[in-house]
Amino acid sequence: MRFYICKEKAEPKPFRIAVIGAGPAGLTAAGYLACRGYDVHVYEKMPEGGGMVAFAIPEVRIPIKAVREGVKDLERIGVQFHFRTKVIYDSPRELGDEWAEHFVSLERLLGEFDALLIATGAWKPRKLKVPGAELSGVYDALNLLHHIKMARIGYYPWERIPDLKGKHVVVIGAGYTAVDVAIEARLLGAEEITMAYRRSLEQSYAKAEIKKLISEGVKFIEMASPVKILGEGRVQGVEFARTRIDEGSVVTTDKRFVIDADVVAYAIGQLPTSPIREVVCANEKILKEAGIFFAGDVVAPRNIGTAMREGRARGKEIEEWLLSKAPRKVFPVPVTARLIGSVVNGKC
């Protein structure tokens, strides 16, 4: 992957930028700014760069080798990486934190750098809130994909990965994450895979990929929402309710049916994981005036291409801000810290 390419690096400029998060958005912004001559440092809690692209998307879709080559390109143009380093403010624990060996406060970065880009992605899966969701054999899709990918690239032993061989895997959801679970389940030997979605197939933004999976034998049930995971100690099935669409909203009906299942993976969305726990005004002028910018999934869900385009756009925005406002340091660090506190408390 080429996160950013420049034929010739510009003369050094007297500004330092910290990028928090080494996913597609953060890496693209870092590449742009480094090419423009800025001193760019990337902080990432994982052992290498790439974000979800490296640590969740199946190896058959995006090989880790391609991601590593893209990161090396950025190192060649001067981007400095700080891996296994988590930036904290009031951050809760989240997926991937076990890899962090160093912790840096957001306040410290505000004092050491002229601008910050927060591109920490969305590493917190939405929980399935139905009875039985805690049963053994029920997984959130993001954790499942993350563990499988970590095993495939040598970070985890395969003993940590659920045995899917010969199993019936039910995937709840119809986005790209759900598609990736179905892909990995097939590769790991699942005998049967059923995807279920509360809307119609045509309303899924991953419908092209799902149609391909259907042609390859994956079953797809539309207009169905889970109401209960069945089993005693371990999952044995899923009870679904038929749904209908009323003025764009999903409405659950009284019609019920059950699908047997050995493994259930739910892919119902992910939540942003910013060093600031509740970024109420994430992209508003308040934080931009303080030199704090956001890009990628930490703002809202993005596909890879959109995240990279946004990273470049945000890099340009940071450069414009640096050249017009940074020399007079709009807000000193203590004021900026209080400003962040106001945002966290919803007072912006």
Image: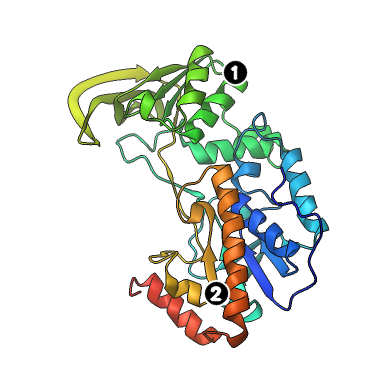
Percent position of residue 174, x then y = 42, 30
Q: Nearer the viewer, residue 238 or 63?
A: 63
- Residue at x 82% of width, y 59% of height: 8
* Circle on res. 189: 1
Amino acid type, mark 2? Gly
Residue 309 visible at all:
yes
Considering only vertical position in the picture, is 67 above or below 78?
above
Percent position of residue 71, x then y = 75, 51
Identify the coloring: rainbow
- Residue 248, located in which quarter of the rendered image? top left
> In the rendered view, does 132 fall on the left or right side of 41?
left
Question: Pointers 1 and 2 in contact (CB under 8 A)?
Answer: no
Considering only vertical position in the picture, is 188 above or below 328?
above
> In the rendered view, does 55 fall on the left or right side of 8?
left
Percent position of residue 221, x then y = 36, 20
Q: Whole-Å distance between the Cαs marked 1 and 2?
A: 49 Å
Q: How many numbered badges does the structure rendering display?
A: 2
Residue 163 visible at all:
no
Tag 1, which secondary structure?
loop
Q: Nearer the viewer, residue 321 or 157?
A: 321
Amino acid type, mark 1? Gly
- Residue at x 49% of width, y 77% of height: 289
Q: Nearer the viewer, residue 125 or 200?
A: 200
- Residue at x 58% of width, y 87% of height: 328
Considering only vertical position in the picture, is 256 above or below 320?
above
- Read off the residue under disc 2: 291
Tag 2, which secondary structure?
loop
Disc 2 crowd, CA 10 A, few/some/many (<14, 14-19, 20+)? many
Residue lying at the far left in this picture: please name it.
254
> In the rendered view, does 141 fall on the left or right side of 77?
left
- Residue at x 67% of width, y 33% of height: 59
